[in-house]
Image (cartoon, grey):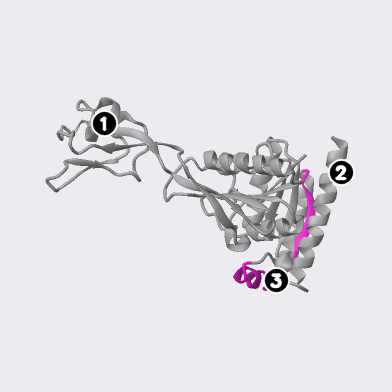
Amino acid sequence: MVKEITVISGKGGTGKTSLAASLVSLAENTAVADCDVDAADLHLVLNPRVEQVNDFSGGKSSAIIPDKCTGCGKCHELCRFGAVVKNTDQKTVFTIDPIACEGCGVCSYFCPEKAIEFKQAVNGQWFISSTRYGPMVHAKLGIAQENSGKLVSLVRSQVKIIAEEKGLPYIIVDGPPGIGCPVIASVTGTDCVLIVTEPTLSGQHDLERVVELINFFKIPAYLCINKFDINPEMSDIIEKKAMAAGVKVVGRVHYDRNVTGAQVKKLPVVEMPNTPAAADVRTMWSNLLQEITAATKVS
């Protein structure tokens, strides 16, 4: 049975994606999903070869048909989002700003001339790619587009189909930061969560929010403290708080400039020889696998 491991963090910039890339490398033959669709960058390290490109539609949007529009202004009057814009040129009286449009369809429904089309909008794209570690499903949400949670669910469902077809043992998911809808879509139904945090006060506070979310869904959770050595005292505090909340600590990773060097070379840091961070991540992966195996035996 495929085991899905989702890597998340309470805030951006904790090293979540870098660690996820290393887990992909250590798992060797695995499926990968980049569910950080608002700011996807796992591809920068894994260097995938895109094999399929698919449009994503998370909703509908309106557009005025110039030849039918009489300029009555009904749409302008009814729109509560300021999306209907009055023009100064002579070609069309009104246009609809696609960024401001919320896709409610009121303008189209009440247009007396039926001059406003209301159709599925392309909000982004999702991709099926190959990497030297295994198949990868990833996506890119358009600028100012919504429904990222729906896109995350799509990415996860597609990667699970591929992993099961190929008989792969693991799916490594790079989830989004925070606790919002995309995060919920990333963790719901996953086998376990690896939370990545940093030893700062904001890291501690954001970790508490993430742990509250994960505990609500009753998902097994584990913790990795990245760059723990920049503030060992805070690392100890975070570790104690996590354990008190039922989150097991599986690793601490040193601050290591080689992480940046690996990113420049489009490599996970575990593929950089003789580096402190690489050794730490390998230990963390071993600890995580032991915990997952033990949990599987109990269940």
Badge 1 crowding class, 10 Å Cα cut-off, few under 14, some 14 to 19, many 20 or more, is: some
The reply, left or right, for residue 279 in relation to residue 83 is: right
Q: Is residue 88 above or below residue 153?
A: below
Which region is colored magenta? 246-266
Q: Callout 2, which amino acid?
A: Ala
Q: Horizontal and vertical percent for residue 288?
A: 80, 51
Tell me how far mark 3 sits from mark 2, CA to CA. Answer: 31 Å
Q: Is residue 114 above or below residue 96?
A: above
Q: Secondary structure at mark 3?
A: loop
Q: Nearer the viewer, residue 191 or 13?
A: 191
- Nearer to us of marks 2 and 1 is 2
Q: How many marks?
A: 3
Which mark, residue 256? Answer: 3
Q: Secondary structure at mark 2?
A: helix
Residue at position x 78%, y 43% in the image: 246
The answer to whether marks 3 and 2 mark residues whose Cβ atoms lie closer than 8 Å is: no
Report which residue position mark 1 lands on: 78
Let me know if residue 189 is in the magenta part.
no
Q: Callout 1, which amino acid?
A: Leu
Tell me how far mark 3 sits from mark 1, CA to CA. Answer: 56 Å
Tell me how far mark 2 sits from mark 1, CA to CA. Answer: 59 Å
Residue sitting farthest toward the left = 90
